[in-house]
Amino acid sequence: MKNSYKLRITPSASVTVVLIYLSKLCSSFLCSLLLLASINLKEICYKLQRNYSLKIAQ
């Protein structure tokens, strides 16, 4: 029963389940650290994208 249920889960649904599991698992401190890390990752990705587009322009 469990295996057939897992097979039916779509990627987006499994991501949602993982996020819900993580939010239940982590404390507010850990969540704030994860939030800061995600913001930093966004900034890094933005900088990399800018550098990449500048290289293409050259």
Image (cartoon, helix red, strand yellow):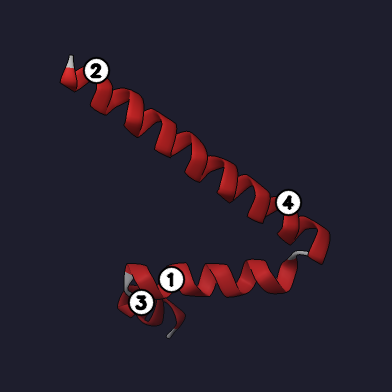
Disc 1 is placed on an element classified as helix
Q: CA distance from mark 2 to mark 3?
A: 41 Å
CB under 8 Å between callouts 1 and 3?
yes
- Residue in the image at 42% along x and 86% along y: 1
At label 1, which amino acid type do we have? Ser
Q: Considering only vertical position in the picture, is 50 above or below 39? A: above
In the picture, the disc for residue 55 is 2
Mark 3 or mark 2, which is nearer the start of the sequence? 3
Q: Which mark lies nearer to you, 1 or 2?
A: 2
Q: Considering only vertical position in the picture, is 46 above or below 57? A: below
Mark 2 neighbour class, 10 Å CA radius: few under 14, some 14 to 19, many 20 or more: few
Q: Nearer the viewer, residue 51 or 8?
A: 51
Q: CA distance from mark 1 to mark 2?
A: 37 Å
At label 3, which amino acid type do we have? Ile
In the picture, the disc for residue 9 is 3
> Percent from the top left, x then y, of residue 39?
57, 48
Q: CA distance from mark 4 to mark 3?
A: 29 Å
Mark 3 or mark 1, which is nearer the start of the sequence? 3
- Residue in the image at 54% along x and 68% along y: 18
Please indicate, yes or no, whether residue 39 appears anywhere in the rendered image. yes
In the picture, the disc for residue 54 is none
- Residue in the image at 75% along x and 64% along y: 26
- Residue in the image at 73% along x and 68% along y: 25
In the drawing, does residue 34 fall left or right of residue 57? Answer: right
In the picture, the disc for residue 14 is 1
* Residue ID for mark 4: 33
CB under 8 Å between callouts 4 and 1?
no
Mark 3 neighbour class, 10 Å CA radius: few under 14, some 14 to 19, many 20 or more: few
